[in-house]
Amino acid sequence: MKAASKDLVARLAGHHAPSSGDPVDPYLPTAGNHGYRVARYDLDLTYKMGSNNLRGEAVITATATAPLDAVRLDLSPHLDVSKVTTDRGRVARYSRPRGKLAVTLAEPLESGTEFALTIRYSGNPRPIRGAWGEVGWEELTDGVLVANQPNGAASWFPCDDHPSSKAPFRIRLTTDSPYRAVVTGALVGKKRSGSMTTWDFDLPYPTSTYLVTINLGRYEHLTVGDGAVPVHAFLPADLKRGFRQAFARQTEMIDVFSGLFGPYPFDEYTVVVTDDELEIPLEAMGMSTFGRGTAESGDRDERLIAHELAHQWFGNAVTAAEWKHIWLHEGFACYAEWLWTEFSGGADAGSHALRYYSKLQDSPQDILLADPGPKDMFDDRVYKRGALTLHALRQAVGDTAFFDLLRAWVATYSGKTATTGDFLRMAADHSPVDLQPLWDAWLFSEPLPPTLGMPDDHTGRR
């Protein structure tokens, strides 16, 4: 491989290390912040359904990673801040530059200092509009759905809104009693007082802000199956029969994926089905949310159910350090769809690969999988080409090494963030052959390789 090509691979596969004046992530230049690392979020929220009014107190515990005289957080301009305090002296002032909360400290903090900010805020939450549509807090016909990916968390709480910023959460939500709150984490307390009910959830796993969610609706609870991993479903009562048919193989999916990828990463799995139709389902930490159409689809949406479940390993347990590495989420979850059919008695992954390789041949070939750009990071071609890259890798190294690699990947990086370069280095340790021609063709070139598998390398050998 030529030196220029090596430089390209190193740049695209690695991790961007911005200076304090650079964006945290070029894909979302206004999201994320420098100078500190969040250790924990404690959110105490009160939400009035009828008026779409949210009042909150957020306690953000963090550690300074550089000398710090001001702390910037992501927060929607539709939410008003009434008070900010810190346990490290006094807050000199705070301001609201667009999409941010900027807190100036009376006394600067040294690098390594732990501190906590307490922020009181209120307002009418609404989605954040961006290149990918509207994300964040969304009112449904009779309820609420929160879909944060990629930068919607700031629509309902102050945060460091970037996937590389992972922290545990404690969320206490008080809302109208007819509605059930289904929030990321384990329900550890519930108390009704008059017309309001307080729901208390604990999420001990390091979690990116985009993977934290709230669902509010007139939901009933079902326990799904009797597998090793507890599975809970929350859905409108009239969808119970359809749900049992559409999600009949949910626990079997968990068993298959646990064998292929390693043990399910969390204590339980939750499925929410909203009363509204959703354009696409959504993954969150230990949870997936679907529209009512999925529960009415019979087995037609089985691949979507498998895809969202697979994100618990690829995206939620192991999270991309930057959005340019999105194929580590979506390519892996897409390939998991194909693996599910293969290992549950349907078509093998190779059949799916041939089908989608043919489709991509007829599609524009102008996306670089290792760095697709913000406009295209959720393009279906990223999903399918990512899955094809994994199938080519599987063909090159064989099943034993391939699945050993996937299990090692999850075990090594669970609870952490990772890059394409991290995966390439681990793959090299599990491969009997030089994989660089494969990566050059599938990850670091726009044209689709001429064959489905390991391409010719620069010497002309296979």
Image (cartoon, grey):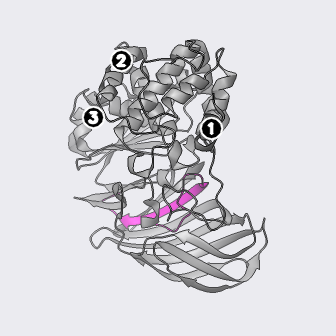
Across and down, in percent, residue 307 comes to: 40, 33
Q: Is residue 182 above or below residue 353?
A: below
Which residue bears the numbered disc 2? 354
Per the image, label 2 sits on a secondary structure element best described as helix
Mark identifier at residue 4: 1
Q: Nearer the viewer, residue 404 or 293?
A: 404
Which residue bears the numbered disc 3? 243
Per the image, label 1 sits on a secondary structure element best described as helix
Residue that extends furthest to the bottom in the rendered view of this protein: 92
CA separation, marks 3 and 2?
32 Å
Residue type beneath disc 3? Phe
Q: Is label 2 or label 1 in front?
A: 1
Residue 94 colored magenta? no
Among numbered discs 3 and 2, the one appearing first in the sequence = 3
Across and down, in percent, residue 247 comes to: 32, 30
Among numbered discs 2 and 1, the one appearing first in the sequence = 1
